[in-house]
Image (spheres, rainbow, N blue to C red):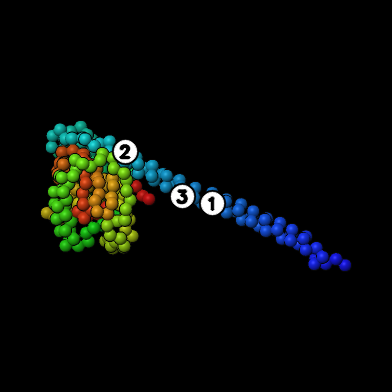
Amino acid sequence: MKTFNQHPDTLILLAIKLSVFYILCLFVINGHYAKAQPVHLKDEINRTSSLQQKVRNIYTSQLGIREKQPNAGPAVEQYLRYVNLPKGNPWCAAFVCWVYGQAGVGNPRTGWSPDLFPDSKVVWQRAESGKLKAESGKAHIFQQILTSEISSKLKTNPTVARQPAYRTGRLATGNRQLMEATPSTGDIFGLFFAEKGRIAHVGFIDQWDGTWLTSVEGNTNFKGSREGDGVYRKRRLVRSVYKVARYVEW
């Protein structure tokens, strides 16, 4: 009678074949999964990146726009019409909404800056108390002095940088909490003005490094005023920012 011990080579060959078959099965299954899973995620990332770039292309195309009269002029009045306001109105918020509208991004179509920062859109917040609001206002004044010295040296198209946020952790907003995100290109920032008791100026974030942000904003000027004469690229201290809202979702 023949036994398995009399044919060790046969057993070894069988074991090898089974092992190879098993490995091939795993390779096929995992390969299919690897192809199936990231494709959707990659498409979503590409879609968001493409929309983000579209927003950036539109707001940078407006650099150099200047008022012909206070809060008036062909381009300025175009921004205001988008939010159903006549010429003569402040237009920083209208500019933001118009850019989003041209990119096909949903927005509140408002000329009132606070309306651009509902709880559902806020992804970063610097000030959470009256004391911090006051600090925000002081930082805004301080950054205006610094900005006047460095704005002329700023590159026209800085490389987009995504660095850690100025403060991380959970953010209390109204009756809810959310995880703070790192502000990025296409997000909008709001500046709090103590004398008005509200956000009174808004613009686009083009670059954010945790200490400084590079912006493109309307109704400002070389000094960074909220009642300026055109669309400018500015550099502001992160500590001067009160809130950041995101309309192009990641």
Residue 152 versus residue 182 in the image, above or below: above
Residue at numbered disc 2: 57
Residue at numbered disc 3: 41
Residue 218 location, quadrant: top left
Residue at numbered disc 1: 34
Residue 30 on image: x %, y %: 57, 54
- Seen at 61% across and 56% down, the residue is 26
Crowding at mark 3 (Cα within 10 Å: few <14, some 14-19, many 20+):
few
Q: Nearer the viewer, mark 3 or mark 1?
A: 1
Determine whether, in the image, residue 231 is placed left or right of residue 17.
Answer: left
Task: Inspect the image, locate mark 1, and give the three-letter code of the amino acid beneath it.
Answer: Ala
Looking at the image, do the residues carrying marks 2 and 3 touch, with CB atoms under 8 Å apart?
Answer: no
Crowding at mark 1 (Cα within 10 Å: few <14, some 14-19, many 20+):
few
Residue nearest the viewer, comparing 65 with 87: 65
Task: Inspect the image, locate mark 3, and give the three-letter code of the amino acid beneath it.
Answer: Leu
Residue nearest the viewer, comparing 20 with 214: 20
Count of numbered marks: 3
Residue 71 on image: x %, y %: 15, 38
Residue 100 location, quadrant: top left
Element carrying mark 1? helix
- Sooner in the amino-acid sequence: mark 2 or mark 3: 3
Q: CA distance from mark 3 to mark 1?
A: 11 Å
Residue 232 on image: x %, y %: 21, 40
Q: CA distance from mark 2 to mark 1?
A: 34 Å
- Seen at 39% across and 46% down, the residue is 48
Element carrying mark 3? helix
- Sooner in the amino-acid sequence: mark 2 or mark 1: 1
Task: Inspect the image, locate mark 2, and give the three-letter code of the amino acid beneath it.
Answer: Asn
